[in-house]
Image (cartoon, helix red, strand yellow):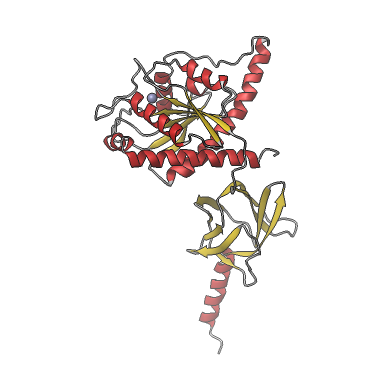
């Protein structure tokens, strides 16, 4: 029997349904150079955010989503499963650790379906040439750095971490670790950068555990170079660290001033990108092991990051002004965890560089 109320309801319901639900129609694969591509066809335009959680890529849609009846798992070794959760999450479960190059949306047009495109490469094996990593233990000698709530000095903490990283990678086939200082020695910032340039380092990591005027602030943060510090706090910290001197140490004595500036600028730009890639891997690995400061990746004008041709990061391993951080930084298990994270991030970063060499 025709029931107008039911009819209205169904009509209204399907109208809403049509307005809101996104249908995931199918997905397919492509391979370009070393980059894998997944294309997901959907029935209409939408918006989504994406997150990476371990081996999962999670797309969070603004609207409700559902898989079409004909949706099938394509046969691809890289993917374990694709599922819909909580009505608006599409979860792509990968078999291995993945590096996502790009995730983007192509709007519906000219009779073509709307598409989500995911470009990724696998991080499966270590096949890069031996890399030289310079680990710089912050401060030293008459410059003791921050003083911890327990009285421990920053220069001691940084040296102990640097030595531990070196020990752990002794005889390692992939990494040669060189320290800027092996003992309680005072070094100028330019000497630290100078070492890295002299040994032609592939990566420079400066270790710190500074103080923060707010004793409650805790967690790991990572700085890379910016021409303009991104916030006042970072700038203030940079000023404190830079009080020594600042010279980039690049030998351009034969070049004119204009050429010199352009060369430094170009190189530095590329180096800054590389540094940021390394930070991404560091954040990913460290977040599995420890607490990170909000806005983990920060930008500042630290002189020690100014080698124009060597990707450089300054790792604030925590704040000595914070009771908990101070304690953690002296805890052997915690040190192990942090160091493991740094090493895995180095492996993944260089593997990624290797995979993306020709792009
Ligand atoms: Zn410091």
Residue drawn at x 62%, y 38% as measured from the top left: 128
Residue 58 or residue 326, whichever sits in front: 326
Q: Nearer the viewer, residue 322 or 103?
A: 322
User: Which one is nearer the viewer's eye here, 68 or 121?
Assistant: 121
> Residue 351: x and y, percent?
59, 41
Q: Is residue 221 above or below residue 74?
A: above
Q: Residue furthest right?
A: 110
Name the residue rendered at 49%, 16% in the picture.
191
The answer to whether residue 199 is visible is yes
Q: Quadrant of residue 325?
A: top left
Number of dots carrying numbers:
0
Snapshot quadrant of residue 19: bottom right
In this view of the protein, which residue sits in the foreground, 72 or 67?
72
Compared with 147, 350 (above or below) is below
What is the x, y in percent for residue 130? 59, 34
Q: Quadrant of the C terminus?
A: top right
Which quarter of the image is occupied by the N terminus?
Answer: bottom right
One can see residue 209 in this view: no
Query: Does 126 appear above or below 185?
Result: below
Residue 52 appears left or right of 70 = left
- The residue at the far bottom in this view is 1
Q: What residue is drawn where x is 63% and y is 57%?
A: 45
Residue 287 place in picture, x, y as percent: 43, 44
Q: Quadrant of ligand 1?
A: top left
- Identify the residue at image location x=31%, y=30%: 320
Q: On the image, which quarter does residue 259 sit in?
A: top right
Residue reaching furthest to the front: 171
């Amino acid at each position: 029997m025709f029931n107008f109320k039911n009819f209205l309801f169904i009509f209204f319901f399907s109208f809403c349904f049509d307005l809101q639900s996104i249908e995931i129609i199918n997905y397919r694969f492509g391979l370009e150079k070393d980059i894998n591509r997944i294309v997901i066809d959907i029935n209409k335009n939408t918006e989504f955010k994406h997150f990476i959680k371990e081996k999962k890529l999670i797309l969070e849609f603004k609207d409700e989503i559902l898989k079409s009846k004909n949706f099938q798992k394509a046969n691809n070794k890289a993917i374990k499963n694709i599922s819909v959760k909580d009505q608006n999450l599409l979860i792509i479960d990968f078999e291995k650790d993945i590096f996502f190059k790009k995730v983007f949306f192509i709007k519906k047009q000219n009779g073509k379906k709307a598409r989500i495109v995911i470009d990724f490469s696998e991080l499966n094996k270590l096949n890069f040439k031996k890399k030289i990593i310079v680990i710089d233990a912050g401060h030293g000698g008459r410059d003791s750095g921050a003083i911890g709530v327990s009285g421990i000095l920053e220069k001691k903490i940084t040296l102990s971490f640097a030595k531990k990283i070196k020990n752990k990678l002794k005889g390692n086939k992939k990494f040669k670790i060189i320290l800027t200082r092996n003992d309680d020695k005072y070094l100028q910032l330019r000497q630290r950068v100078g070492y890295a340039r002299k040994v032609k380092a592939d990566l420079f990591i400066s270790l710190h555990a500074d103080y923060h005027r707010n004793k409650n602030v805790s967690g790991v943060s990572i700085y890379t170079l910016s021409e303009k510090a991104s916030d006042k706090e970072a700038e203030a910290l940079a000023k404190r660290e830079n009080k020594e001197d600042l010279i980039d140490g690049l030998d351009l004595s034969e070049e004119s001033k204009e050429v010199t500036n352009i060369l430094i600028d170009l190189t530095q730009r590329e180096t800054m990108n590389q540094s940021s890639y390394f930070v991404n891997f560091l954040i990913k690995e460290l977040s599995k092991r420890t607490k990170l400061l909000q806005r983990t990746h920060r930008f500042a004008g630290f002189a020690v990051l100014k080698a124009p041709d060597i990707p450089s990061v300054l790792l604030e391993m925590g704040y000595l002004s914070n009771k908990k951080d101070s304690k953690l930084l002296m805890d052997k298990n915690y040190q192990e965890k942090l160091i493991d994270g740094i090493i895995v991030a180095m492996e993944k970063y260089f593997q990624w560089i290797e995979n993306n060499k020709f792009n």
